[in-house]
Image (cartoon, rainbow, N blue to C red):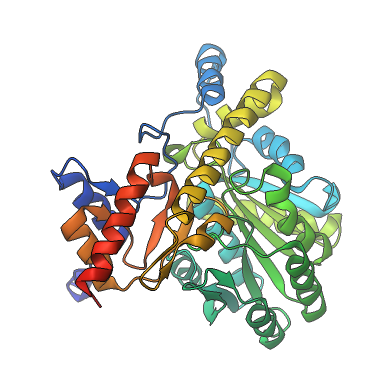
Amino acid sequence: MAFEQLSLLPADPLLALIGAYRDDPRPFKLDLGVGVFRDAAGGTPMMRAVKKAEERLLATQDSKSYLGPEGDAGFVAALAPLVLADAVPAERLAGIQTPGGTGALRLGAELLARAGVSRIWIATPSWPNHAPIFAAAGLTPEAFDAFDVASQTLDGTALLAALDKAAPGDAVLLHGCCHNPTGIDPDAALWAEIAERVEARGLVPLVDLAYQGLGDGWDADAAGARTVLARCRHGLLAYSCDKNFALYRERTGALWTVAPDAEASAILYSNLLALARANWSMPPDHGAAAARIVLEDAALAAEWRAELDAMRERLVTLRQGVSVLGTIGSIDLAPIAGGKGMFATLPLTRSQVAWLREHHAIYMAASGRINIAGFSEASIGRFGEALKALVEAQVG
């Protein structure tokens, strides 16, 4: 049989890490691996505004009938102006709901492939699932180095040089804000240069905006995406509500396309619907419906934004706390304060990451990526002591 040609694949590293942490009986264990926001008590609670929206949805929703491959059109329409403001005229914009940001990325990749795009440029390190998603859709990921993990800096010159090497019609992946896994974002000047290169080279930007509101604030976090998409002829924006609405398991996202005019936009929209129909037919509605209710109600929207601001402020405080640890051996933690959002990547080897897990019950990705939200104020000091012990043990 054909199935006999298949071989056993290794478990996804992050999923394996989740299982290992769950099974660890040590009471002082620290989870810095899973990419979810945590409050001071270590939980990932539902947002109050979203909970109220769900209660309203339960009381008023009178049907579970299909919505169609476009999903909750009201959700997409309410979110678009908040995300893009006036960067792109409405007639050039088309969007549909997707199963999370991952679904948006896959749908965007398939649209690129259908349009004849064969290659997408990715600055590394990037979210580990980016390249597999694009490759599965038929694109060739072209990786290039642009981040210095040791110094926690982005090499803008290398990024722009890669864009200069890209051929017209190539796609380029851009993290909209709160870069995963480094937390290092372009500044306004570099975003302007990226936009200029994308336009001049005839590239297609695919902006992955998964953490809006958790970096510098709502509009600031979308500024880069707006700058680039305002100048491009064609572009894509993959969006996730997992983090900023705390809708992780509801898989709530959207994909927008940017086209030269209304006629071209209608063509792209029809292709989005066809691709979505072939992939998941109809996206799940509950999370999108709850988010729509929040966005359409001024009081709920204000409460949600206040909660989101509190989440962002917690991340800023934790980053500052980690940065105060200073330099431990060759690990300089001071730049962590300048990062954005939930993630940072430390210059650790796989052996060092494994040693920290074995001897101090500190769990993180093998790459050295840590989830800043996994810390509590109390655990930061213990983390610093564990790094000191690592240095003293001379683990390579």
Q: Position of residue 144 (x, y in %)?
A: 55, 81
Residue 87 versus residue 61 in the image, above or below = below
Q: Closest to the observer: 347 or 123?
A: 347
Q: Closest to the observer: 190 or 391?
A: 391
Total numbered labels: 0
Q: Could you tell me which residue is drawn at 56 percent across and 15 percent down?
A: 56
Q: Is residue 25 visible?
A: yes
Dividing the picture into quarters, in which one does residue 27 lie?
top left
Q: Position of residue 206 (x, y in %)?
A: 64, 64
Residue 214 versus residue 170 in the image, above or below = above
Q: Could you tell me which residue is drawn at 32 percent across and 53 percent down?
A: 383
Indicate left or right for 70 with 388 as reference: right
Q: Could you tell me which residue is drawn at 67 percent across and 43 percent down?
A: 217
Indicate left or right for 188 with 293 as reference: right
Q: Position of residue 357 (x, y in %)?
A: 22, 58
Q: Residue furthest left?
A: 25
Q: Residue furthest bottom?
A: 165
Quadrant in which the C terminus is drawn: bottom left
Q: Is residue 282 visible?
A: no
Dividing the picture into quarters, in which one does residue 122 lie?
bottom right
Q: Closest to the observer: 8 or 224?
A: 224
Q: Position of residue 207 (x, y in %)?
A: 64, 61
Quadrant in which the N terminus is drawn: bottom left
Q: Closest to the observer: 92 or 322?
A: 322
Indicate left or right for 30 with 126 as reference: left
Q: Residue furthest top?
A: 59
Q: Could you tell me which residue is drawn at 22 percent across and 74 percent down?
A: 395
Residue 245 versus residue 153 in the image, above or below = above
